């Protein structure tokens, strides 16, 4: 999502949320910012459309949400469902973890995020094919095959057969 689509009020709110992260969010951010979750690059408190995601990896199109106790209520669950649906419409997958999971099952949470990020980063539809080595001295495929100017294809010698 382009940066310009985010209004100044939402930017201020995201900046405020970065300063006021919960204990579980801080603990998880310590791992994510060091690229320990599958090598993926995450940002924190990221404005996306009408929402602010706790953590987002734009390259893998992955959102990670850390939910407090209020997310167990019916009203908040409905709001979370709408939010997750909106992220999905933008092509993002959302992973949700409770504060309790982050604090008590931390290694499992990080492994789950890493596995999801790796699966999405290396999915065939977003993966670039491996780059080919550069041609020697700018001669293209002839340098690799042994052919050069004035040589017949395949014989490695100049002239006609």
Image: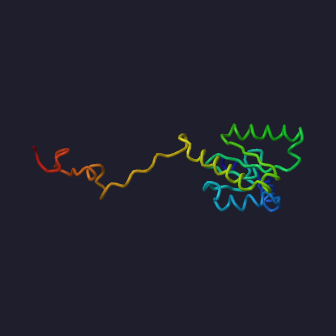
In percent of width and height, residue 121 lies at 58, 47
Give the residue at x 83% y 58%.
22
Residue 80 x/y as whole percent = 81, 41
Q: Is the C terminus in the top left, top right, bottom left or bottom right quadrant?
A: top left
37 horizontally vs 15: left or right: left
Task: Identify the image quadrant of residue 92.
Answer: top right
Seen from the viewer's position, the closer of residues 138 and 96 is 96
Query: Would you identify the image quadrant in which residue 71 lies?
Result: top right
Of all residues shown, which one is farthest toward the left? Answer: 161
Tell whether 56 sits left or right of 143: right
Q: Is residue 148 left or right of residue 128?
A: left
Instruction: Give the residue drawn at x 38%, y 54%.
Output: 133
Q: Position of residue 76 (x, y in %)?
A: 87, 42
Q: Residue at x 68, y 49 (%)?
A: 112
Q: How is the image coloured?
A: rainbow
Side of 158 relative to 35 (left or right): left
Q: Quadrant of residue 43?
A: bottom right
Residue 46 position, x and y percent, is 73, 53
- At a point 17% along the width and 50% down the height, the residue shown is 156
- Nearest the viewer among 60 and 105 is 105
Number of dots carrying numbers: 0
């Amino acid at each position: 999502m382009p940066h310009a689509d985010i209004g100044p009020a939402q930017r201020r709110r995201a900046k405020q949320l970065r300063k006021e992260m919960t204990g579980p969010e801080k603990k998880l951010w310590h791992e994510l910012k060091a690229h320990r979750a599958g090598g993926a690059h995450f940002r924190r408190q990221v404005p996306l459309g009408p929402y602010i995601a706790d953590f987002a990896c734009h390259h893998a199109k992955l959102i990670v949400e850390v939910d407090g106790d209020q997310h167990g209520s019916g009203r908040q669950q409905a709001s979370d469902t709408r939010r997750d649906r909106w992220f999905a419409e933008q092509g993002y997958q959302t992973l949700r973890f409770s504060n309790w999971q982050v604090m008590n099952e931390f290694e499992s949470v990080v492994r789950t995020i890493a596995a999801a990020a790796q699966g999405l980063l290396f999915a065939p539809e977003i993966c670039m094919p491996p780059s080919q080595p550069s041609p020697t001295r700018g001669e293209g495929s002839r340098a690799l095959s042994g052919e050069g100017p004035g040589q017949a294809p395949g014989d490695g010698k100049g002239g006609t057969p």
